[in-house]
Image: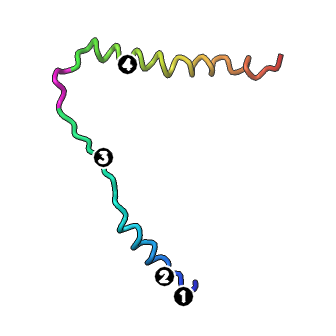
Amino acid sequence: MSVLMPQLLRGLTGLTQRLPVQRAQIHSKPPREQLGTMDVAVGLTSCFLCFLLPSGWVLSHLESYKKRE
């Protein structure tokens, strides 16, 4: 290791300490009303239809996608 390496690292760390850091201003509050059973069922069903159904279709037809016609 060269003699300049510790000075270089010290210079880089000093530079990063002087840079301003932006922080997200995230504040959450309790929900105004509780989620009902129907709300949860609709949310889970829509997630299933949007994400799992298309990927399941592709995986089930993978052999036909591999064939060159």
Q: Is residue 41 above or below residue 14?
A: above
Q: Nearer the viewer, mark 1 or mark 3?
A: 3
Q: Which residue is mark 3?
A: 24
Task: State if disc 2 and disc 1 touch (CB < 8 Å).
Answer: yes
Task: State if disc 1 and disc 4 touch (CB < 8 Å).
Answer: no
Label drawn at residue 44: 4
Amino acid type at image mark 1: Val
Residue at x-position 57% and y-position 22%: 55
Q: Nearer the viewer, mark 4 or mark 2?
A: 2
Residue at x-position 40% and y-position 67%: 16
Gap between marks 4 and 3, in whole Å? 29 Å
Q: Earlier in the sequence, mark 4 or mark 3?
A: 3
Q: Which residue is mark 1?
A: 3
Tell me the SS state at disc 2. helix
Q: Residue 17 sits in which quadrant?
A: bottom left
Q: Residue 15 sits in which quadrant?
A: bottom left
Direction from residue 54 to residue 63 in the image, left or right: right
x and y percentages locating residue 62 in the rendered image? 69, 21
Gap between marks 4 and 2, in whole Å? 55 Å
Q: Earlier in the sequence, mark 4 or mark 2?
A: 2
Counting every numbered tag in the picture gives 4
Q: Give the colour scheme shown.
A: rainbow
| Range covered by the magenta-colored residues | 30-34
x and y percentages locating residue 21 in the rendered image? 34, 57
